Amino acid sequence: MKRTARPALGTILFFAIAFALGIYFTFAAVQGDYGLFRRAEIDAEAKDLGNRLAAVQAQVAEMENLTRRLSDDYLDLDLLDEQTRSVLGMLRSDEIVIR
C-alpha cells in the first residue's frame, strides 16, 4: 500500500489565514483611514489650504496698507479723496462722468 503525502488540514488553514490577513493589511495600508490614498488626499488638501492662506494673507496686507494710509500718522490725500467720492458718490465740478 502506497501512501501519498498530503499536507495536513492545519497547515492549509494556517496559510489560508495568513494569506487573508496579508490581503487585509495590504488593503488597509492602501485604502484605510491612514492609507496611501488618504495621505495623498491630505497632502492635496494641505496644499489647497496653503494657497488659500497665502491669498488671505495678501488681502490682510492690502487692508493693513490701506488702513495705514488713512491713519492719523500718515494720511494719503489721494486715497482719502477716492474713498470719500466712492462712499458719498460725489464729483468735482471739473469732472465728466461717462456711463
Image: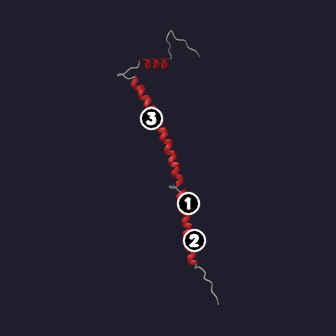
Query: Mark 3 or mark 1: which comes first in sequence?
Result: 1
Q: Which residue is mark 3?
A: 57
Mark 1, residues whose alpha carbon is within 10 Å: few (<14), some, or many (≥20)? Answer: few
* Residue 16 image label: 2
Residue lying at the far left of the rendered structure: 73
In whole angstroms, how far apart are the C-alphas of marks 2 and 1?
Answer: 16 Å
Residue 13 percent coordinates (x, y):
57, 74
Q: Which residue is mark 1?
A: 27
Is there CB contact under 8 Å for labels 2 and 1?
A: no
Is there CB contact under 8 Å for labels 2 and 3?
A: no
Could you tell me the amino acid type at mark 2?
Ala
Could you tell me the amino acid type at mark 3?
Gln
Query: Mark 2 or mark 1: which comes first in sequence?
Result: 2
Residue at figure coordinates x 47%, y 41% from the top left: 50
Q: Is residue 68 left or right of residue 86?
A: left
Secondary structure of residue under mark 3: helix
Residue at figure coordinates x 48%, y 17% from the top left: 85
Q: Nearer the viewer, residue 27 or 89?
A: 27
Residue 82 percent coordinates (x, y):
47, 19
Residue at figure coordinates x 48%, y 20% from the top left: 87
In whole angstroms, how far apart are the C-alphas of marks 2 and 3?
Answer: 57 Å
